[in-house]
Image: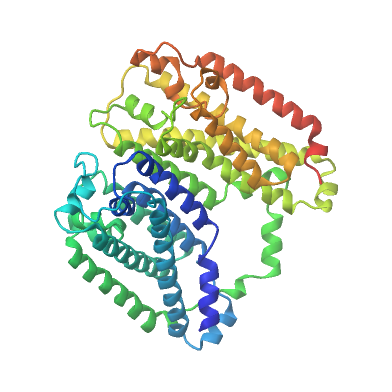
């Protein structure tokens, strides 16, 4: 039992949790520096930050669990003697991980609150700014008691969600399970905008995780707790009575002949790279991110919207000299998601390339051109989807277009495409020198953060330059006479892309080939 428990914990714990801690700090940094809350009030406010929980905390938890749902080896099941013993080790691991997942973030928030004044009451809160704290002030006497309730409620919610994921994965294929999980998550995301989902609130994830949403979306906290406990007992009963009869590892399907057959299907390095990059995981990842960002921008938009205004809001980005952690984070996620996936692809292809492959290709130029072509194709599809998804959402919501819609779409498409291609080539160029993809990607993040420097010459630095709020045709509407000229930006990006491509093409042997 102990070895199975440790194995499950090793699957769940990963470096993704460290990344989530950094996002947590960024999302609450402004409230810590510029806020007027006491330390107890700040902890309650941070633990109730539904923007962070829904957009980052819940997706990361789902991603970490989905990543751990691999087919278990046969010896593990044999050693467990029966499926229930095996599943109990999972239950213990899921409970422990849920506690670590929540309390580690609560600890970080508590550390951030050090230095604030101590005030274990809800007095002195601005109700227009801190609506959630004002809401809790009518139901609880002190913030310290509320902190205990929020963390306990969140731990139990994540534990229940982990059993849901495990149950779905065992009853369905991993592909189908991921689709179901994404649907449930998107349903919970839409609950922010739609307040009339009470009759199906038992399907909404955030009602079991966010204490505040348990009041406004669910059937009150006590009923939600009863539903959670019933779900947990039902899932345990299903696993105990039925799942041990349907264990199928499909080991017979994994044969050498099948591996050779699948490998021989792709003739040519381009087809191989194309199949590797355009995997179902990579496609679903970009669609998932674009759906989240598009719906979040819809939530943060005004009620009087048109398709044009919605697109401008989605692609607004961050302006020069603006230090708003949330807006900067939105820009980084929106712009660097495809580059992150491409960086994983490039590192994998470079590590898997051997001397035999180089001899088979006869020239390293074929490998280099294949990488560039398939990467550009991936960026093109991402750019099209980034525009198409908000437009589809607009049509479903019945938003009407304004004049010059097609011109706006072409403008967004052109600067977005060239900007992502340029930043991808910068990543490739840095990687060719450092041979460290992590350093290359973080260098790209730092280059994008240059925009927070409040100097006009920063405008034409080509990182994050696809942010529409930096352009003259947008700023002129607000009485601002300076900004980027679209033609100059397109010319600048085209020249820089051409220079980098020529350089990589002429020096790719010394820069890339091992």
The image shows residue 200, relative to residue 472, as above or below, that is below
Please identify the quarter of the rendering in which residue 458 is found.
top right
Q: Examine the rendering and report whether any part of residue 70 can be seen.
A: no
Q: Residue furthest left?
A: 138
Q: In the rendered image, which quarter is residue 219 located in?
A: bottom left
Inspect this view and state whether residue 359 appears: yes
In this view of the protein, which residue sits in the foreground, 192 or 325? 325
How many numbered marks, from 0 up? 0
How is the protein colored in the picture? rainbow
Position of 167 with respect to 152 (left or right) is right
In the image, residue 181 sits, relative to residue 484, either above or below, namely below
Could you say which is closer to the camera, residue 424 or residue 317?
Answer: 317
Q: Picture coordinates of residue 67 (x, y %)?
A: 51, 61
Answer left or right for 363 relative to 69: right
Give coordinates of residue 50: x percent, y percent: 32, 49
Q: Is residue 446 above or below residue 230?
A: above
Residue at x 53% of width, y 37% of height: 381
> In the figure, residue 79 lies in which quadrant?
bottom right
Position in image of residue 244 (x %, y %): 44, 82
Which residue is situated farthest in the bottom direction here? 81
User: For this view, does 235 lie left or right of residue 449?
Assistant: left
- With respect to residue 329, does 104 lie above or below? below
Towards the viewer: 312 or 45:
45
- The image position of residue 281, as x and y in percent, is 53, 52
Q: Residue furthest top?
A: 481
């Amino acid at each position: 039992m102990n070895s199975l428990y440790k194995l499950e914990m090793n699957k769940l714990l990963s470096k993704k949790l460290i990344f989530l801690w950094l996002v947590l700090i960024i999302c609450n940094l402004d409230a810590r520096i510029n806020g007027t809350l006491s330390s107890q009030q700040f902890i309650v406010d941070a633990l109730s930050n539904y923007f962070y929980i829904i957009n980052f905390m819940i997706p990361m938890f789902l991603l970490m669990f989905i990543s751990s749902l691999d087919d278990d080896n046969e010896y593990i099941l044999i050693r467990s003697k029966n499926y229930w013993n095996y599943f109990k080790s999972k239950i213990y691991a899921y409970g422990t991980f849920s506690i670590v997942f929540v309390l580690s973030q609560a600890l970080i928030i508590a550390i951030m609150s050090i230095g604030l004044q101590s005030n274990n009451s809800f007095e002195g809160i601005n109700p227009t700014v801190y609506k959630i704290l004002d809401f809790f002030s009518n139901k609880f006497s002190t913030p310290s008691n509320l902190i205990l309730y929020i963390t306990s409620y969140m731990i139990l919610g994540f534990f229940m969600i982990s059993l849901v994921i495990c149950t779905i994965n065992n009853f369905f294929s991993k592909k189908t399970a991921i689709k179901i999980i994404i649907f449930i998550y998107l349903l919970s995301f839409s609950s922010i905008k739609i307040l009339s989902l009470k009759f199906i609130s038992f399907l909404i994830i955030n009602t079991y995780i966010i204490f505040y949403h348990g009041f406004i979306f669910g059937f009150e906290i006590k009923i939600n707790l009863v539903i959670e406990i019933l779900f947990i007992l039902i899932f345990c009963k299903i696993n105990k009575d039925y799942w041990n009869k349907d264990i199928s590892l499909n080991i017979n399907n994994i044969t050498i002949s099948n591996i050779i057959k699948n490998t021989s299907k792709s003739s040519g390095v381009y087809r191989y790279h194309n199949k590797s990059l355009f995997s179902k995981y990579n496609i679903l990842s970009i669609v998932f991110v674009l759906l989240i960002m598009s719906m979040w921008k819809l939530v943060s938009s005004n009620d009087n919207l048109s398709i044009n205004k919605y697109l401008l809001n989605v692609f607004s980005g961050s302006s020069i000299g603006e230090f708003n952690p949330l807006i900067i984070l939105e820009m980084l996620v929106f712009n660097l998601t495809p580059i992150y996936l491409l960086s994983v692809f490039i590192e994998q292809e470079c590590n898997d390339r051997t001397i035999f492959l180089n001899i088979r290709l006869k020239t390293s130029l074929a490998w280099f051109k294949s990488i560039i072509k398939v990467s550009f194709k991936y960026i093109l599809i991402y750019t099209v989807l980034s525009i198409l998804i908000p437009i589809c959402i607009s049509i479903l919501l019945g938003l009407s277009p304004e004049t010059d819609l097609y011109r706006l779409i072409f403008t967004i498409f052109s600067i977005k495409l060239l900007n992502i291609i340029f930043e991808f080539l910068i990543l490739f160029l840095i990687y060719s020198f450092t041979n460290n993809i992590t350093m290359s990607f973080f260098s790209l993040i730092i280059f994008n953060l240059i925009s927070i420097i409040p100097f006009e010459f920063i405008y034409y630095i080509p990182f994050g330059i696809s942010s529409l709020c930096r352009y003259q045709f947008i700023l002129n509407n607000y009485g601002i006479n300076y900004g980027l000229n679209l033609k100059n930006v397109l010319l600048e990006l085209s020249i820089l892309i051409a220079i980098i491509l020529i350089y990589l093409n002429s020096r790719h042997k010394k820069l890339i080939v091992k």
